[in-house]
């Protein structure tokens, strides 16, 4: 029984990894006017999976979600978003100031 349970967990884990890879691949192959840069995709993939994976990648809902959880985003993701022009440094400073209150 343990071997079957362990095998099921391993298959479930592999399926989860495959699903995450499929999401990243979908984002990478989706040429759209509102598409994010490869740098943002790479830097923010874990943030997306942790916070906003209930929404389709690069959808308006995902953008709203990422803004809503902005205070939890990794520094690498934030830096990539600033470099890509998705958010400005003044947006970041304003948000940090409002979170301190």
Image (cartoon, rainbow, N blue to C red):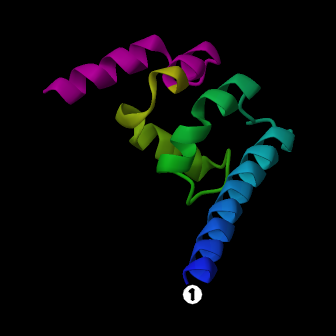
Question: Nearest the camera: 9 or 62?
Answer: 9
Quarter residue 14 falls in: bottom right
* Residue 83 picture location, percent across and down: 61, 13
- Image quadrant holding the C terminus, namely top left
User: Is residue 87 something that shows in the picture?
Assistant: no
- 20 in relation to 37, above or below: below
User: Magenta span covers which residues?
Assistant: 78-101
Task: Please report the residue visible at 64 percent of the width from the left and 69 percent of the height from the top.
Answer: 12
Q: In this view, does 50 lie to the left or right of 21?
A: left
* Residue 29 picture location, percent across and down: 86, 42
Residue of label 1: 1
- Image quadrant holding the N terminus, namely bottom right
Quarter residue 68 falls in: top left
- 17 in relation to 36, above or below: below
* Residue 24 picture location, percent across and down: 73, 44
Task: Please report the residue visible at 22 percent of the width from the left and 26 percent of the height from the top.
Answer: 98
Task: Please report the residue visible at 70 percent of the width from the left and 64 percent of the height from the top.
Answer: 15
Q: Is residue 59 left or right of residue 82?
A: right
Q: Is residue 94 magenta?
A: yes
Q: Is residue 90 magenta?
A: yes
Residue closest to the far left? 101
User: Is residue 90 something that shows in the picture?
Assistant: yes
By secondary structure, the bulk of the magenta-drawn segment is best described as helix
Quarter residue 7 falls in: bottom right
- 87 in relation to 60, above or below: above
Identify the secondary structure beneath mark 1. loop
Question: Nearest the camera: 88 or 79?
Answer: 79
- 12 in relation to 95, above or below: below
Task: Please report the residue visible at 55 percent of the width from the left and 60 percent of the height from the top.
Answer: 54
Q: In this view, does 63 lie to the left or right of 41?
A: left
């Amino acid at each position: 029984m343990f071997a079957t349970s362990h095998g099921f967990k391993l298959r479930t884990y592999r399926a989860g990894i495959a699903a995450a890879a499929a999401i990243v691949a979908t984002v990478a192959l989706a040429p759209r006017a509102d598409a994010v840069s490869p740098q943002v995709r790479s830097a923010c993939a874990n943030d997306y999976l942790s916070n906003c994976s209930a929404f389709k990648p690069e959808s308006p809902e995902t953008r709203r979600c990422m803004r809503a959880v902005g205070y939890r985003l990794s520094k690498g993701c934030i830096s990539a978003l600033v470099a890509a022009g998705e958010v400005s440094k003044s947006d970041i400073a304003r948000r940090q100031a409002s979170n301190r209150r």
